[in-house]
Amino acid sequence: MKYTKIFLCFVAIVLATSGCSSNGNENQKTSENQEIKKHQKASNYQDACKELDFETAREYLGELHQIYINEQAQNGITHRRQRKEAEGNYYKAFDYIYKAEIQYLLSEYDEAECVDRISFFLEDIPIEGEKFPGGLCDYFIVCRGDWGDEGIPLDAYIVWTEHYNRLCNTILSLSINRNYPQLAKVALMQFVDNVEAHKGGDGVKIDGVKVDGNHGYIKYTSTDRDAAKKKYDEAVKMGYLKE
């Protein structure tokens, strides 16, 4: 009976030691897996944003941007579909990544820090295409790449203004929700002019200027900026923003 008790105690010690060793190994493996995962690059920009790895997300955005730039350099007529596809892919990522990062910044930092960080990356966003002078222009420029290469730079600029102003509007809306008046003012200052590209023809007259069939007319307006200012003023009036 004495030896039986000794044997059972020995077995219990061995099992306990084995369990501790097993748990130690499992904990070590878990720690190693977490470390490996931390250094693995996300497979796409959506996953990178979910992991709050915005540096990697912007790397993917940079790759899509380069593809878009390459397609802009191709013939306007034969490569229109490829150019628009590349453009769509780039701006889909553009909208997704910057909105996700802005939401993260506003959830983690105070207003002063958000102003600095958001102002910095807004300034870092590349302007696409070319801002042509307002007024009369060659007809094919306002065709925006549908009939040749001349209009590709204007088309790229118009699309860029649409997405950039949309981003500024997102910043403004979130600033109002967080009661960040200084950041809201930064967003207002960043809006760019809207662009209208009008084709000429018989009887076409814009801003008092006759535009015949050999010309187009480029007009700049402040439609988005005015709408944003109205939203800002209403937020201040209703007490959502305290200046």
Image (tube, helix red, strand yellow):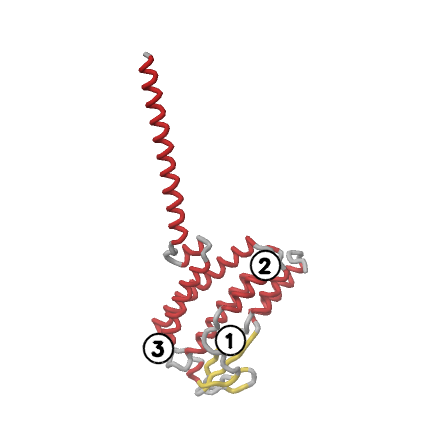
Residue 190 lies, in percent from the top left, at 57, 69
Secondary structure of the residue carrying tag 2 is helix
Q: Amino acid at mark 2?
A: Glu
Quadrant where the image shows the N terminus: top left
x, y percentage for residue 54? 46, 58
Using the image, determine if residue 12 lies above or below residue 103.
Answer: above
Mark 3 or 2: in front is 2
Q: Which mark is residue 113?
A: 2
Q: Residue at x 39, y 66 (%)?
A: 64
Inter-mark Cα distance, 1 to 3: 24 Å
Q: Quadrant of the C terminus?
A: bottom right
Q: Amino acid at mark 1?
A: Val
Q: Earlier in the sequence, mark 2 or mark 1?
A: 2
Side of 231 relative to 30 (left or right): right
- Check disc 3 and report its element: helix, strand or loop: loop
Q: Which residue is mark 3?
A: 74
Q: CA distance from mark 3 to mark 2?
A: 42 Å
Query: Which residue in the structure is indicated by mark 1?
Result: 195
Q: Residue at x 52, y 59 (%)?
A: 102
